Amino acid sequence: MEKIYDVIITGAGPAGMTAAIYAKRAELETLLIEKNFMGGGQVLNTYEVDNYPGLPGINGFDLGEKFSEHVDKMGVERISEEVVSMELTGDVKKVVTDQGEYLSKTVILATGNSPRKLGVKGEEEFAGMGVSYCATCDGAFFKGKITAVSGGGDVAVEDAIFLARGCEKVYLIHRRNELRAAKSLQTALFNTPNIECVWDSVVTEIKGDGNVTGITVKNVKTGEEKEIPLSGMFVAVGNEPNSSYISDIKCDEKGYILAGEDCKTNVPGVFVAGDLRSKRLRQITTAVSDGANVITSVQDYLI
Ligand code: NAP
């Protein structure tokens, strides 16, 4: 007979891994599925995490590894496979991956989100040739060069500060004249001499000749366009939910799954935790919080 798990968790970011730890502590038959070789999710691409209690200034990669080690220490069964579809409406849920099928009484959706694209000419063509969505992964290739970051949130500002450590100059291009990033990050940004903010502006084209050589930037208030010669264009304009494999679940207008703090979706036995849940604040701490709360809801459902 095919094994039926108590809970299958899709996604091994902070929410999925916390849920796995709590599930094991609750002695639930648990399977954690993550498409990437390493667990950790977006944390792995963060240079420095300064708001996770008890670990000030920890490198994101190290924090992701610590979560992973904890999951392994608890003896959680985990596999590296990509979930392609699911059948969620019956009492026994079926999770289909690129390598097999798994059955479970409950499912926790914890696949988070991915970087949003700018959607401008040249972005796709020069992806990996100067266009990047991860400064901590690719920043080292641009030592001594000129780069730009598009965006005005925590990630864009963190990326600009990180890049400024090695680059000759960094432009921060933001569509408004006010950043939404945390005030402490803004202070650090404004105190970094080799960062220039380009306000009220958007990137309209990324140009190159094999590799990126420059961008066109348009001032959204005046309509004026200018060319900026550079080697690296970092895109940090927010995220989109990783939910393409999910159907039959109610989402908000941005595609994030609707659920309250109890993490219950509209389908019985199906739960959502972490950045994939429709919520106000997406942080490692709030993802971890969901990971804990969701197991209480799973236990209630199983009882
Ligand atoms: P975000 O907070 O959603 O910011 C996205 C930024 O990109 C905004 O400034 C937005 O402009 C801009 N933007 C969106 N679409 C755009 C477009 N098409 N063209 C140009 N600009 C565009 O996203 P994020 O910075 O990736 O952060 C994601 C989440 O992770 C946030 O909740 C953040 O707080 C969290 N985070 C936290 C930490 C930390 O606490 N240490 C670190 C990293 C990330 P507007 O401002 O005009 O909307």
Image: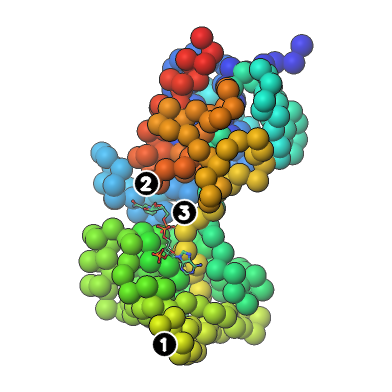
Quarter of the rendering containing residue 213: bottom right
Residue 132 at what x, y percent from top left?
54, 67
Instruction: Specify whether 45 is left or right of 111.
Output: left
Q: Mark 2, residues whose alpha carbon is within 10 Å: few (<14), some, or many (≥20)?
A: few
Q: Residue at x 31, y 70 (%)?
A: 178
Task: Indicate which label's residue lies in the foreground, 2 or 1.
Answer: 1
Q: SS for tag 2?
A: loop
Mark 3 and mark 1 in contact (Cβ < 8 Å)? no
- The image quadrant that residue 163 belongs to is bottom left
Q: Earlier in the sequence, mark 1 or mark 3?
A: 3
Which secondary structure lies at badge 1?
loop
Vertical side of 44 occupied by 75: above or below: above
Mark yes or no: residue 105 visible.
yes
Residue at the top extreme of this rendering:
303
Q: Mark 2 = which residue? A: 281
Which circle marks residue 222 in the picture? 1
Foreground of the two, 292 or 219: 219
> What residue is pinned by disc 3?
45
Density class for disc 1 (Cα within 10 Å; few <14, some 14-19, many ≥20) is: few
Q: Position of residue 190 (x, y in %)?
A: 25, 72
Residue type, label 1: Thr
Drawn side of residue 80 relative to residue 27, left or right: right
Q: Nearer the viewer, residue 33 or 255?
A: 255
Mark 2 is on which residue type?
A: Leu
Which residue is pictured at 63% across the width and 41% down the height?
35
CB atoms at circles 3 and 2 under 8 Å apart? no
